Image (cartoon, rainbow, N blue to C red):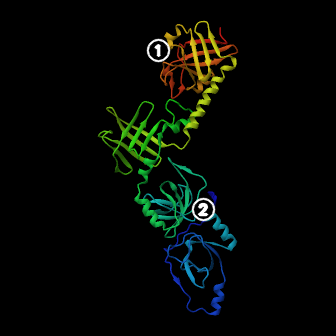
């Protein structure tokens, strides 16, 4: 159902309903004739558990009482008449349109929701600035009538707008972040009681695979650092083994815990002899975002972790393909880059390289003594200023280097070869080459050798 179609339900305040039934004991022929006429057909959007009508029924409407705010209906298969509050029924001029309305309503027939917080507003329109028409109490049940087509962002929260109906006849729009939705063909009030007895935040903490918040930032910026991005990084809770694991680019630690204590509103502590006196503390800012506090040596560290819905392996594969494509820009001219002063670089399969006879260059820029082979990589990006003068940044990571080290160069192609300009590690910030050295080391390699 689209966002526009949510507005088909008018918003109005009705008197608190008092439903009652009556049986016509005396009915004259004229009255019977009058009763036989209908003013339309009603779709029951929310029936009562012990009432005469069921949710989803289509019934002929005999008349409307403006005083009682009720419809007089003839019960299906009987001659009995009953009054039903108008807010429980959606009126259509004929049966055909009532049937169409029932088909549109079918996905929401058994859908309900309840408020997770006191004062949750129902608004006149699906807009956070719209007039508030009602405030839900914590745990209050509502009937879901429709849902917006797409999730919307309000502050740091993302969810749908729902068109809802309260048990005292109010109707309007409620943002879904603190409005858990559920389906049941049974008693919805009993379902709410069961759901509220649970601890949804604790369940989210235990069931979610938590990833560092910077994962999302990298994806949004389109700059993936493969030394810190991958399926191995995160905060993992294994409830069966009673173990939590914390894996970052700098540390990997497993902790056995004995219990999880609730120490405040959405705050939990993993406790156990392996964890230490302070425990591992989690502040659940939402079901999708936590602040993790833990000790490492003598330090207390805090990090933000999130639920990350995207496929990490696909993102990693895409980043590796991007880097391979950059290496392919070197290969059409040959797999050998040669210099009379700085030796030959052989570009090999699998993004490998060998560098022979580099001479004094090793003393000038290499971080340690190397044998001359390793991986070619393209982890860095040009700043907007440098992008006008250079084609890219290439990194030679010798086998003796760690994964976050390398000898990196700005490069520019010409018809005969490639010009390399060495960049210092301190000139790279957040994967971007921010500036050039004041007295840069520039070397030139010819395609195919000297």
Q: How many marks?
A: 2
Q: Which mark is residue 368?
A: 1
Rendered position, 27 above or below 128: below
Residue furthest front in the image:
241
Rendered position, 280 above or below 84: above
Which residue appears at 55% of the width and 68% of the height?
A: 12
Earlier in the chain: of badge 1 and badge 2, it is 2
Q: Residue 28: where, in percent of width, then height? A: 62, 93
| Quarter placement of the C terminus | top right
435 left or right, relative to 31: left
**Camera-side residue of 168 and 379:** 379
Q: Is residue 43 visible?
A: yes
Residue furthest left in the image:
277
Label 2, residues with CA under 10 Å away: few <14, some 14-19, many ≥20: some
Q: CA distance from mark 1 to mark 2?
A: 66 Å
Which residue appears at 65% of the width and 91% of the height?
A: 30
**Camera-side residue of 316 and 286:** 316
Label 1 sits on a secondary structure element that is loop
Q: Residue 68: where, in percent of width, then height? A: 53, 79
Which residue appears at 45% of the width and 49% of the height?
A: 204
Q: Which residue is mark 2?
A: 107
102 left or right, relative to 244: right
């Amino acid at each position: 159902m689209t966002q526009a179609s949510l507005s088909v339900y008018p918003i109005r305040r009705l008197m608190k309903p008092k439903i009652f039934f009556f049986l016509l004991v005396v009915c004259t022929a004229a009255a019977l004739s009058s009763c036989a006429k209908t003013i339309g057909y009603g779709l029951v959007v929310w029936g009562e558990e012990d009432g005469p009508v069921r949710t989803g029924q289509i019934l002929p409407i005999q008349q409307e009482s403006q005083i009682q705010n009720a419809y007089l209906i003839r019960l299906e298969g009987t001659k009995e008449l009953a009054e039903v509050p108008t807010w429980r029924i959606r009126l259509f001029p004929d049966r055909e349109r009532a049937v169409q309305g029932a088909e549109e309503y079918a996905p929401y027939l058994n859908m309900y929701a309840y408020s997770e917080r006191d004062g949750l507003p129902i608004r006149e329109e699906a807009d956070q600035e719209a007039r508030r028409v009602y405030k839900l109490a914590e745990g209050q049940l509502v009937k879901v009538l429709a849902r917006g087509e797409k999730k919307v962002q309000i502050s740091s929260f993302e969810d749908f707008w729902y068109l809802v109906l309260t048990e005292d006849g109010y109707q309007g729009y409620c943002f879904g972040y603190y409005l858990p939705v559920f389906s049941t063909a049974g008693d919805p009030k009993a379902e709410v009681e069961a759901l509220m007895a649970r601890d949804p935040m604790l369940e989210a903490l235990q069931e979610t695979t938590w990833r560092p918040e910077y994962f999302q930032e990298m994806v949004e910026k389109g700059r993936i650092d493969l030394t810190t991005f991958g399926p191995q990084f995160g905060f993992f809770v294994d409830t069966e083994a009673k173990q939590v694991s914390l894996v970052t680019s700098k540390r990997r630690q497993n902790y056995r815990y004995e219990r999880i204590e609730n120490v405040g509103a959405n705050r939990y502590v993993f406790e156990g002899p392996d964890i230490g006196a302070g425990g591992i503390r989690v502040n659940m800012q939402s079901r999708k975002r936590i602040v993790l506090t833990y000790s490492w040596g003598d330090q207390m560290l805090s990090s933000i972790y999130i639920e990350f819905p995207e496929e990490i392996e696909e993102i990693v594969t895409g980043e590796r393909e991007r880097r391979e494509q950059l290496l392919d820009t070197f290969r059409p001219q040959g797999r050998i880059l040669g210099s009379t002063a700085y030796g030959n670089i052989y570009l090999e399969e699998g993004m490998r390289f060998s560098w022979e006879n580099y001479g004094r260059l090793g003393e000038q820029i290499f971080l340690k003594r190397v044998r001359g082979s390793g991986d070619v990589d393209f982890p860095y990006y040009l700043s907007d200023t440098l992008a006008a003068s250079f084609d890219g940044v290439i990194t030679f990571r010798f086998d003796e280097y760690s994964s976050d080290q390398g000898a990196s160069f700005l490069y520019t192609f010409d018809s005969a070869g490639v010009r390399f300009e060495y960049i210092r590690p301190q000139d790279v910030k957040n994967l971007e080459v921010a500036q050039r050295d004041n007295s840069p080391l520039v070397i030139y390699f010819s395609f195919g050798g000297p």
